[in-house]
Amino acid sequence: MTKISINTLKNENIIDITDKVNEEIAKNKMTEGEIFLYLPHTTCALVVTEKTDSAYKYDFLKASKEMVKNYAFKHVGGNGEAHFKAAVFGTSRNLIVSNGKLLLGEWQGIFLVEFDGPRNREIMIKFRA
Ligand code: ZN
């Protein structure tokens, strides 16, 4: 197992980690197999989504806020909205490695989505040959 550390820099942010994950695959010398990515956090998520349009990052964060705009979270920590979104979008992904890198569609990337930053986040990575 290995891990990537990311400083998310903003309260809400969507960060393309595709290149960083591919660097870890190269360091591990994996050419074919599976990669399991996991966040040991309750207020950020991992998503595979559109990578080419920077306006879409705004859309994603805005749409996720709209999803819960009519609900007043009672969680005493004050970050119930972030916990909820992390649970909805998910904190893990299982992806295919082929030819030494992530097997993704032309328009896909993998992103860490921060809902309660800025914070230092860790992405745990397990390789399965
Ligand atoms: Zn909390």
Image (cartoon, rainbow, N blue to C red):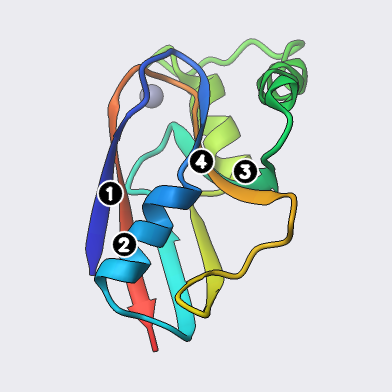
Q: Is residue 103 left or right of residue 75?
A: right
The alpha-carbon separation of the residues under discs 3 and 1 comes to 20 Å
Q: Is residue 51 visible?
A: yes
Decide: marks 3, 4 in contact (CB < 8 A)? yes
Residue 109: x %, y % from top left: 61, 49
- Tag 4 residue: 45
Residue 78: x %, y % from top left: 43, 12
Decide: marks 2, 1 in contact (CB < 8 A)? yes
The alpha-carbon separation of the residues under discs 2 and 4 comes to 19 Å
Label 3 residue SS: helix
Q: Nearer the viewer, mark 2 or mark 3?
A: 2
Q: Which mark is residue 24?
A: 2
- Choose between 28 and 38: the one closer to the eye: 28
Q: Is residue 38 visible?
A: no
Looking at the image, residue 115 lies above or below residue 90: above
Q: Quadrant of ligand 1?
A: top left
The alpha-carbon separation of the residues under discs 2 and 3 comes to 23 Å
- Choose between 63 and 42: the one closer to the eye: 63
- Tag 3 residue: 89
Q: Which mark is residue 4?
A: 1
Looking at the image, residue 103 lies above or below residue 23: below
Which residue lies at the image location 65% right of the left edge and 63% below the top edge? 104
Decide: marks 2, 4 in contact (CB < 8 A)? no
Q: Which mark is residue 20?
A: none
Position of the C terminus, as image quadrant, is bottom left
Residue 13: x %, y % from top left: 51, 22
The alpha-carbon separation of the residues under discs 1 and 4 comes to 14 Å
Closer to the chain start, of discs 3 and 4, is 4
Position of the N terminus, as image quadrant, is bottom left
Q: Residues within 10 Å of mark 1 (few under 14, many from 20)?
A: some
The image quarter in which residue 51 lies: top right
Closer to the chain start, of discs 2 and 1, is 1
